[in-house]
């Protein structure tokens, strides 16, 4: 059975003081993760534009198989 104090301890609160922990212990940043997320956004934009251009190119220059379509 889990007592009420164990949850407070897991969240970083002391059962006696009931003050929140210092800000530095709660916020952790990862520079490599932030860089990868930024690159991921750039990749997504490039991928979306490339896909859109590919659809436009294929619809304009490739023939449609009206009689050759197999259902």
Image (cartoon, helix red, strand yellow):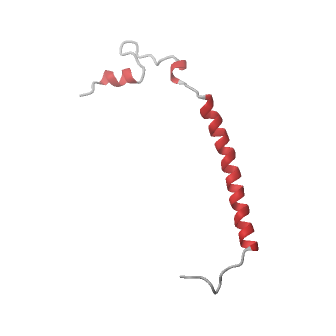
Q: Eyeballing the image, is 18 above or below 59?
A: above
43 or 9: nearer the viewer? 43
Residue at 67% across, 47% down:
43
Left or right of 41? Residue 14 is: left
**Residue 52 placement (x, y as % from top left):** 70, 61
Q: Which residue ends up furthest to the bottom in the rendered image?
A: 67
Give me the residue at 38% from left, 23% from top.
10
Q: Is residue 70 left or right of residue 51?
A: left
Residue 56: give x, y in percent of width and height: 73, 67
Q: As displayed, is residue 7 above or below residue 14? A: below
Res. 41 image quadrant:
top right
Residue 43, placed above or below residue 35: below
Residue 16 placement (x, y as % from top left) = 36, 12
Question: Could you tell me which residue is drawn at 56 percent across and 82 percent down?
Answer: 70
69 or 24, which lies in front? 69
> Where, quadrant-wise, is the N terminus in this rendering?
top left
Number of dots carrying numbers: 0
In terms of image quadrants, where is residue 55?
bottom right
Instruction: Out of 66 and 5, give the one closest to the viewer.
Output: 66
Q: Position of residue 14 (x, y in %)?
A: 39, 15
Horizontal relation, residue 69 to residue 17: left or right: right
């Amino acid at each position: 059975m889990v007592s009420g104090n164990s949850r407070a301890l897991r969240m970083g609160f002391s059962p006696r003081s009931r003050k929140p922990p210092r800000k530095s212990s709660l916020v952790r940043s990862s520079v490599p993760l932030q860089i990868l997320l930024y690159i991921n956004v750039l990749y997504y934009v490039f991928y979306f534009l490339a896909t859109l251009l590919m659809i436009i190119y294929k619809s304009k220059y490739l023939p449609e198989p009206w009689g050759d379509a197999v259902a």
